[in-house]
Image (cartoon, rainbow, N blue to C red):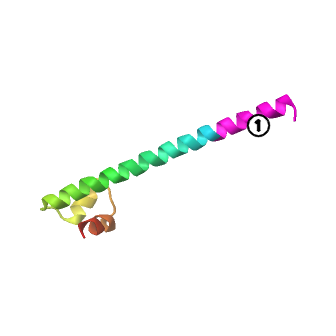
Amino acid sequence: MSDLAKEIMELGEKRGLEKGREEGREEGRKEGAEQSKREIALVILAQGGATPEQIAQWTGLPLETVISLKK
């Protein structure tokens, strides 16, 4: 394999790794935000006085998720 071909392969590999890392970070941010919403919903549920519909509206969670957290 020529030096140029090796360089091209290494560059492609590096770009692929960078893209994979960025996608992983983005997925992690999304999962973290979702977990935070669930934790907030759990605190509100523990406090009482709010309906699942209100909690869903306030947190942006689907109503079904809030209901499942209530159980």
Where in the figure is residue 67, as x and y percent of width and height? 27, 68
**Quarter location, residue 58:** bottom left
Quadrant (top left/top right/bottom left/bottom right) for the N terminus: top right
**Region rendered in magenta:** 1-16
Please, which residue is most extreme toward the front here? 1
Kind of element beneath mark 1: helix
Residue of label 1: 9
**Quarter location, residue 7:** top right
Q: Residue at x 38, y 48 (%)?
A: 32
Quadrant (top left/top right/bottom left/bottom right) for the C terminus: bottom left
Categorize mark 1 by other alpha carbons within 10 Å: few (<14), some (14-19), many (20+).
few
Q: Residue at x 30, y 65 (%)?
A: 63
Please, which residue is most extreme toward the top here? 3
Where in the figure is residue 40, as x and y percent of width and height? 25, 53
**Above or below — where is 13 with respect to 57?**
above
- Towards the viewer: 38 or 51: 38
Residue 27 belongs to the span the image colors magenta:
no
Q: How many marks?
A: 1
**Quarter location, residue 46:** bottom left
Residue type at mark 1?
Met
Where in the figure is residue 4, as x and y percent of width and height? 83, 29
Secondary structure mostly taken by the magenta-highlighted segment of the chain: helix
9 sits left or right of 65 in the view: right
Please, which residue is most extreme toward the right here? 1
**Above or below — where is 54 with respect to 5?**
below
Q: Residue at x 49, y 42 (%)?
A: 25
35 sits left or right of 17 in the view: left
